């Protein structure tokens, strides 16, 4: 539904918004990772052409509080994040001043005239450096640079290791990466004329942004309206509240004028949240047939300089540790998970958050068991899978897998791949001196979680619910807003399909609008593959209620029983024939004129538990021993996201996710120097896949409906990345007979491993 408008160039992204009198904001960012701010000389900038104001932390005192994360998790610490740094800077890219000018060029020129005097302090950037005895502290309130340490034990792990035939150990390291959407972040804000503020943002979480703006600016929640503009890619990087959103709202109210900031790519690499940056060590107690009896894991997560709102420093550490058993029937499991403070850009969500690294760990484990015991990697997975007969299954860590057949997904993928034949080809290739590798990535993830999940995690800023507001418009069409904005994932199309099915009309008669917090709420936002689960369910239920209201109103107007009525393309039908009353006429009447039936409904949905899609990815690679280059020769996916609303969109999500997993395995890495300086600040240094690197993917769909809600959908947006990272890494490891893995496996690293 949204494609035509976007392809014709009529989208409304942040940079397209140009209200009269608009001013532009430029942001001065710290050039060093750790230091004390001695002074900021802004006099030359204030006198520069076109400059109307320059703001520093002093200007915000008393009218704008720091960005605070509200956590109830025992032992978790997340210090407030200043909107503008005052006495300390903690990462390269932290904002220290803002310039407001008549044009973006004037604002950027004036930034160069500000003279920051920052006394450098020692920086910590690595796991080892931050956790070393006597290491410099990123925050005085975070002892040992540990925001959080989680330790949990399930079952009898000690006995499992005592009974093991062998113990298999390994380690995986995932690099720090950036989501790198086509459109960077952007914010426009303007006063509403009544003391409040309206903010347009390229965001995945407009309601969470509105809550944070109201809190930091000390406004009543009703005084803050946030509108999600068209979003040119999110992938999780826009699923948080940034200081820029708070600052622009503050400046708009201070200057009583509309202001806008759009992110340069260099700013994006510096200050838009990074992701992953994890190391996992694991040890498994294993029987001779490959069955895992017990599992231990240590998870290190480099969170950076601040915990982000709304997740704090807990998202990757908790998600990863909780899903390391994966789709396997492992009852005896224990972990330690460390959330580590460093002088790097804050870490945040990115497609498959925490689950990518959990799956990388358990899939490396399966391959290492196979190598140790001379078993087939597929057979090791089969002997460990949770079986269909065990469904519904409660994992040791509490994840309630409601439905699925993991063995069937593996078998379907292997059949489509021609697994036996490929293994024979691999043997022949080895005899010829060619390096072929086969990789398998099986996983289960969780999506669309409700309020109970976030309460259990102690993330008090996340409601976990989502709302759909649906009404009959005066144009005679049904209009819909949800709290999950479109971020490039096609949800306007899928929401229209779901609403139309519930209403009994064609999707073309449903207009899905981008999220505006003044028109719909409350809700959580577009992350954790919520769209086809929580937002779609609320839309489906709203459609049923609106259909009932429309037919009851028409029944009153026509003096006909509801059973004879139906909704046509633009009118009410009696026994399938035009009734003489159009939908536009119904919409134009007030409730009294429609028998008291308001043609405007809202439904808030709270999932009783998360849904659990799953898949198996299988790929074949060839590694060039002379150059270290990797060529993907075949790629197959067998996935189960429950009921498919739109198969074409599902397949696009799978392939797009695979492209991002491929990038992390083969080329992407945010790199910092020893003093915390960013070394990968442009696309010349940070390489992402292009169309020529993405393989042709064969996809098989299994459909096991979710039992959590009536649509039976499970979410599909993240699985491609989750499965691809493990499958491709395993394939390269298979080709080179590697054990521990440190990504990315770039040609130079592979060449070094071969040598």
Image: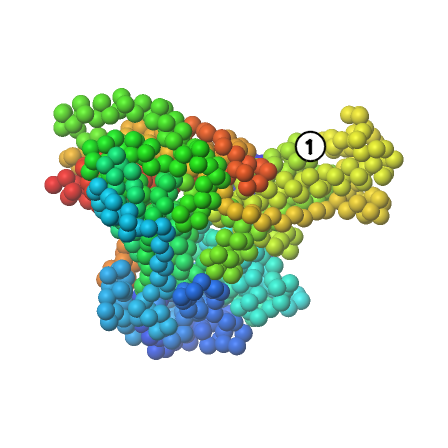
- Closer-to-camera residue (506/681): 506
Res. 73 in view = yes
The quadrant the N terminus occupies is: top right
725 horizontally vs 465: left or right: left
Q: Quadrant of residue 639?
A: top left
Q: Position of residue 235 (x, y in %)?
A: 44, 47
The residue positioned 35% from the left and 70% from the top of the image is 142
Specify the farthest residue to the right: 559
Frontmost residue, 383 versus 444: 383
Relative to residue 524, is residue 312 drawn left or right?
Answer: left
**Residue at position x 49%, y 76% in the image:** 61
Residue 202 visible from this viewpoint: no
Q: Quadrant of residue 139?
A: bottom left
**Residue 550's spot in the image, x, y percent?**
76, 39
Within 10 angstroms of label 1, few (less than 14), some, or many (20 or more) residues? some
* Residue furthest to the left: 755
Residue at x-position 78% and y-position 37%: 551
- In the image, residue 694 sits, relative to residue 575, either above or below, namely below
- Left or right: residue 167 versus residue 59 is left
Above or below — where is 427 with respect to 680? above
Which residue occupies 25% across, 39% down?
287
Query: Circle 1 — which element?
Result: loop
In the rendered image, residue 672, in percent from the top left (x then y), is placed at: 27, 58
Give coordinates of residue 670: x percent, y percent.
30, 53
* Residue holding disc 1: 504
| Image quarter in which the C terminus is found | top left
Number of marks drawn: 1
For residue 416, above or below residue 172: above
Q: What colour scheme has been applied to the protein in the rendered image?
A: rainbow
Nearer to us in this view, 109 or 167 = 167
Q: In the figure, residue 108 lies in which quadrant? A: bottom left
- In the depicted structure, whether residue 476 falls above or below residue 95: above
């Amino acid at each position: 539904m949204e494609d035509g408008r976007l392809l014709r160039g009529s989208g409304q992204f942040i940079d397209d918004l140009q209200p009269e009198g608009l001013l532009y904001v430029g942001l001065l960012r710290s050039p060093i990772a750790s230091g004390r701010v001695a002074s900021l000389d802004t006099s030359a900038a204030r006198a520069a052409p076109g400059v109307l104001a320059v703001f520093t932390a002093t200007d915000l005192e008393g009218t704008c509080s720091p960005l605070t994360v509200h956590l109830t998790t025992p032992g978790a610490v997340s210090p407030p994040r200043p909107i503008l740094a005052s006495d300390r800077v903690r990462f390269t890219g932290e904002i220290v001043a803002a310039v407001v000018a008549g044009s973006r060029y004037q604002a950027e020129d004036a930034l160069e005239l500000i003279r920051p005097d920052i006394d450098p302090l020692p920086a910590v950037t690595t796991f080892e450096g931050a956790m070393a005895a006597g290491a410099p502290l990123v925050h005085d309130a975070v002892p040992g640079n540990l925001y959080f340490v989680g330790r949990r034990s399930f079952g009898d792990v000690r006995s499992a290791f005592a009974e093991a035939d062998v113990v298999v150990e390994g380690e995986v390291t995932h690099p720090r990466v950036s989501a790198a959407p086509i459109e960077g972040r952007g914010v426009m804000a303007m006063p509403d004329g009544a003391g409040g503020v309206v903010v347009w943002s390229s965001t995945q979480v407009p309601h969470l942004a509105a809550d944070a703006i109201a809190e930091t600016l000390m406004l009543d929640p009703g005084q803050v309206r946030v509108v999600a503009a068209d979003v040119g890619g999110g992938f999780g990087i826009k699923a948080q509240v940034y200081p820029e959103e708070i600052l622009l709202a503050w400046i708009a109210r201070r200057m009583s004028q509309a202001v806008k900031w759009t992110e340069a790519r260099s700013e994006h690499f510096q200050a838009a949240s990074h992701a992953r940056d994890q190391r996992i060590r694991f040890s498994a107690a294993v029987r001779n047939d490959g069955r895992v009896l017990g599992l231990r894991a240590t998870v290190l997560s480099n969170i950076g300089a601040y915990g982000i709102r709304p997740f704090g420093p807990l998202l990757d550490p908790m998600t990863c540790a909780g899903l390391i058993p994966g789709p396997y029937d492992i009852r005896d499991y224990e972990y330690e998970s460390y959330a580590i403070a460093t002088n790097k850009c804050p870490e945040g969500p990115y497609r498959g958050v925490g689950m990518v690294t959990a799956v990388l760990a358990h899939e490396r484990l399966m391959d290492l068991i196979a190598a140790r015991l001379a078993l087939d990697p597929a057979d090791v997975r089969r002997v460990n899978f949770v079986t269909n007969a065990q469904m519904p299954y409660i994992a040791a860590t509490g994840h309630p897998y409601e439905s699925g057949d993991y063995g069937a997904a593996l078998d379907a993928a292997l059949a489509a791949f021609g697994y036996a034949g490929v293994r024979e080809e691999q043997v022949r290739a080895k005899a010829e001196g060619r390096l072929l590798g086969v990789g398998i990535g099986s996983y289960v993830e969780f999506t669309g979680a409700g309020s109970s999940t976030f309460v259990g995690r102690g993330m008090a800023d996340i409601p976990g619910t989502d709302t759909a507001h649906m009404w009959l418009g005066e144009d005679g069409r049904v209009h819909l807003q949800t709290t999950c904005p479109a971020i490039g994932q096609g949800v306007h199309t899928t929401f229209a399909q779901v609403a139309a099915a519930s209403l009994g009309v064609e999707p073309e008669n449903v207009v899905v609008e981008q999220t505006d917090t003044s028109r719909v709420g409350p809700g959580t936002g577009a992350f954790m593959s919520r769209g086809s689960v929580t937002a779609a369910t609320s839309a489906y239920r709203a459609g049923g209620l609106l259909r009932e209201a429309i037919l009851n109103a028409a029944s009153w107007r026509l003096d006909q029983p509801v059973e004879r009525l139906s909704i046509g393309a633009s009118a009410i039908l009696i026994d399938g024939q035009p009734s003489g009353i159009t939908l536009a006429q119904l919409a134009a009447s007030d409730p009294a004129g429609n028998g008291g039936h308001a043609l405007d409904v809202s439904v808030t949905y709270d999932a009783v538990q998360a849904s659990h899609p799953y898949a198996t990815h299988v790929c074949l690679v060839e590694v060039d021993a002379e150059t270290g280059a990797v060529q993907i020769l075949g790629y197959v996916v067998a996935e189960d996201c429950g009921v498919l609303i739109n198969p074409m969109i599902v397949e696009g999500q799978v392939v797009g996710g695979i492209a991002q997993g491929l990038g992390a395995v083969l080329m992407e890495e945010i790199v910092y120097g020893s003093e915390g300086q960013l070394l990968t600040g442009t696309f010349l240094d940070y390489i992402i896949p292009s169309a020529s690197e993405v393989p042709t993917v064969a996809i098989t769909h299994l459909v096991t409906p979710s039992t959590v809600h009536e649509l039976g959908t499970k979410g599909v947006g993240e699985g491609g990345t989750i499965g691809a990272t493990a499958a491709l890494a395993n394939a390269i490891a298979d080709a080179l007979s590697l054990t521990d893995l440190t990504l990315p496996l770039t040609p130079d690293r592979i060449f070094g491993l071969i040598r």
